[in-house]
Amino acid sequence: MSWEDNCDSLCPIARALTEVGDRWTLLILRELSFGVHRFEEIQAQTEMSSHSLASRLKRMEEAEIVVRRLYSTRPDRYEYFATDKGKDLDAVLLALRAWNLKWDRRSDGEEFAVKLVHKKSGELIDGHWQNPPGESFSFDHTDARMSDSYRAEREGKRQKFSAGKRRR
Amino acid sequence: MSWEDNCDSLCPIARALTEVGDRWTLLILRELSFGVHRFEEIQAQTEMSSHSLASRLKRMEEAEIVVRRLYSTRPDRYEYFATDKGKDLDAVLLALRAWNLKWDRRSDGEEFAVKLVHKKSGELIDGHWQNPPGESFSFDHTDARMSDSYRAEREGKRQKFSAGKRRR
């Protein structure tokens, strides 16, 4: 059984995993929440092949997790945005982030790759932070600041991707 | 890049996804939280091949997400249990469940596959429920009742698995 199968289980976790499936959907949503909307920039950061990324985005569109908008013609080029349904996976991303921050010893004492502060309360969002009652979590409710080292990691990926393109 | 690669990113979401990876780890943890601990019973419910399940459980042991305990000898047979680190992924499972309950129109008006009630507060855990502040979520804090139809789905999987074994 591959994750692409339609899921006829009654279990909502199994159903959710049919749409979220593997790491790629969530990594793409992470990029969109960072304000990265263009195909090649998403590709550079996720290190997916263009074929995998195209088919994944298509599937995410069908599942109404993302929408695309034309931003340039000849050739047509699109930007991708999370829908409300897609943004609602922010809670899943946050739970994964918290879990890693709590359990991955590599994170101890390390600067946050992205320092997140909850706008309304001014609280630092770490592995133990809890969303205020009555509000669903969204990265839109946070101020995010990338560390210099994480920024450098991302710049490295951009350069590696551009170099790969020039060689082709 | 496959999810089995070591992740040298600074991003905690990417790191978490390296360990959680795809649907299988989460579906196995779902089974453990249902009290299903034996290899063949997990296999029947997840519909994984025995090779995939064995290698995934080994990887989850290495990541300290599960531990195994010998329960029978000649041949040695083990039961698998979530560690504290593994149980802490309950928050991720809960977020996926909530997301599906909110967005999957198939779930509208359908009985919960597993009706979850938060023990301490007596609240029904639906797609909008929020964990009380100061407490991390665990299925251990809930009373769970499977619907008859979900029970039947699981019984069907058990029978299909046993029939497959007899044919081999």
Image (spheres, coloured by chain):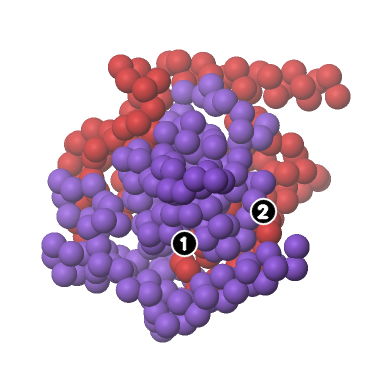
Chain colours: A red, B purple
Q: Which residue is mark 2?
A: B49
> In the visual, does A48 lie left or right of A140?
right
- Residue visible at 54% across and 63% down in the picture: B45
Residue A121: image quadrant is top left
**Is residue A8 visible in the rendered structure shown here?**
no
Mark 2 — on which chain does it sit? B
The residue type indicated by label 1 comes to: Ile
Check if mark 2 and mark 1 are on a common chain: no
> In the visual, does A117 lie left or right of B111?
left
**Is residue B100 visible in the rendered structure shown here?**
yes
In front here: B116 or A131? B116
Vertical relation: A71 (above or below) B116? above
Q: CA distance from mark 2 to mark 1?
A: 20 Å
> In the visual, does A148 lie left or right of A32?
left
Q: Which residue is mark 1?
A: A13
- Residue visible at 52% across and 24% down in the picture: B9
SS at mark 1 in the image: helix
Residue A4, label in figure: none
Residue B108: image quadrant is bottom left
- Residue visible at 56% across and 57% down in the picture: B40
| Residue B125 x %, y % | 28, 67
| Residue B109 x %, y % | 41, 84
The residue type indicated by label 2 comes to: Ser
